[in-house]
Amino acid sequence: MKTRYALLAGSIAVLTAVSVVSATSAPAPKVTGAGQTLEGTTGAGDTIAFVAQDTDGDAGNAARGQVQYVDREDGTQTVQHGLIDCLLYEGENSARFAGTWKGGGTFEIAVTDNGQGANAEEDLIGVFPMAEPDCMNDDGPSDDAATALARGNVQVH
């Protein structure tokens, strides 16, 4: 009889430990997206794909991730790949992340997730050059200019 109670108590302890580990090891917050802006009404604009994930649980510091950005300007096309250094949440549906382009230079990207579905507004995105990739919204008024992501989706998780 004591053996059954010991086994039952041991089983409850294991289940409790598994529940605590599951609750504390939830995935870190992240921002994902991909899409294209429009030039005029129908022309192909810049294209972007990214994933940025918080790595330290602190709202706005260390992050990891990647971004691919195709800048189409004046009939030319420049493809850039970058690594993400920081992620800052600016509300329920907006965030900014920053990092370094693999070919040199730094960037900051600001996004707004306006929902999914036919009735949702278009998501917004802005890609800005930076002196330092610090995720702070203190680089001047042009830092807040964003463009509608007409083809694609941004998700602030």
Image (cartoon, helix red, strand yellow):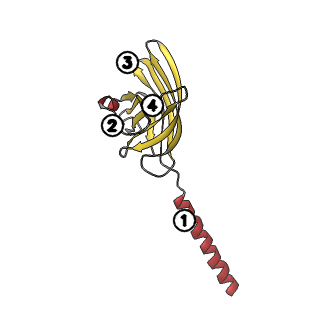
Under circle 1, the secondary element is helix
Under circle 4, the secondary element is strand
Mark-to-mark CA distance, 2 and 3: 32 Å
81 and 85: which is toward the camera? 85
- Residue 61 x, y percent position in the rendering: 45, 46
Q: Amino acid at mark 4?
A: Phe
How packed mark 3 is, by other alpha carbons closer than 10 Å (few <14, some 14-19, many 20 or more), is: few
C-beta proximity under 8 Å, tags 2 and 3: no
Q: Which residue is mark 2?
A: 138
Mark-to-mark CA distance, 2 and 4: 14 Å
Pick whichever of labels 1 and 2 is earlier in the sequence: 1
Relative placement, left or right, of 68 versus 136 is right
Which of the two discs, 1 and 2, sits closer to the camera?
2
C-beta proximity under 8 Å, tags 2 and 4: no
Instruction: Report the residue at 41% width, 43% height from top.
Output: 88
Mark-to-mark CA distance, 1 and 2: 40 Å
Q: Which residue is mark 1?
A: 20
Which of the two discs, 4 and 3, sits closer to the camera?
4
Q: Which residue is mark 3?
A: 41
Instruction: Report the residue at 53% width, 31% height from top.
Output: 82
Residue 135 shows which numbered tag?
none
